[in-house]
Image: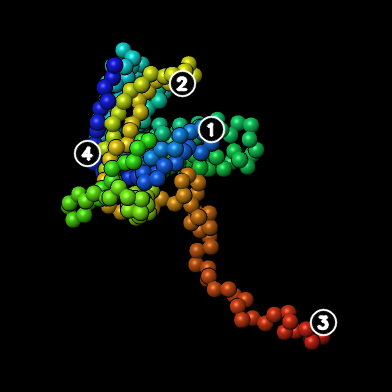
Amino acid sequence: MAETVRYTLVKPARLLYSSITSKSAPQGVQGATPKFSGTFGIEEEDFKAIVKIMVDGITAELGSFSGNPGDYYLACMSGTTAGKRAIATAEFKGAGKSADEQMKLMEKAQARAELYKPYAGILTASSQYAVELAKLVAGKIVDIPDEEVARAQAGKDLFYPGAVVAPAIALKAFRRKTLDAKDGVTAYLQNCLFVSKGQRIAGSGGPSNNDVFGNYAGYSDVDPTAGAPTNADFEDDVAF
């Protein structure tokens, strides 16, 4: 039986999606349990280390590893593979839906694939229990109090999509429980350190407002009709 292996990222990662300070459930998944979770874009050194842990874990749990990552549910995969899976998932979910719904699903999936592409690996980790949080201040690690207000503020100011963080996880291989499921490796999110601010990621999949409305950039936000005469001002005038 595979052991649980704890791993702390060697290099800072970019937080891509965040429910680190408050629980959430996957959209469209009936009966899903709300959890604390995060999706991280990680560098090659950490990606390779996590892949080895996952392969070793599956081998220990099942007796062998097929060599095909697609045969398993994996908590970490390459940025390219994660993008392809996002698009494949959108195609699957869009089957039988209207053209408009399919387009929206595909827009989000394509934006997600572009978001994943620059990273060696995409890591997704979750926990039913509150994640231990800390921040780096002048080279020192400062704990964030396990209090509702402090955690909520940290979620707003520190652990937002786009922030640079260092997560600590526990990886565990598992056997599938049903025939239509997959064996694999899950990652439990245990600690997360805020390292530095990064550019916030707009939205969570679809095109940002800047992308959609970019041609309006430079337009004045002053109402051009403010102070202009109204129809009432001309009520006594003779029409042409």
Residue, far left: 139
Q: What residue does disc 4 label? A: 10
Q: Nearer the viewer, mark 4 or mark 2?
A: 2
Q: What residue does disc 3 label? A: 240
Q: Nearer the viewer, mark 3 or mark 2?
A: 2
Q: What residue does disc 1 label? A: 30
* Helix, strand or loop for disc 4: loop
Q: Which amino acid does label 2 sit on?
A: Ala
Q: In which quarter of the image is residue 99?
A: top right
Q: Nearer the viewer, mark 1 or mark 2?
A: 1
Q: Which residue is drawn at 44% across and 51% down?
A: 202
Q: In terms of depth relative to the viewer, which is nearer, 30 or 9? A: 30
Q: Which tag, 4 or 1, sits closer to the chain's start? A: 4
Q: Which tag, 4 or 2, sits closer to the chain's start? A: 4
Q: Circle 1: is it few (<14), some (14-19), or many (20+) Cα within 10 Å? A: few
Q: What residue does disc 2 label? A: 181
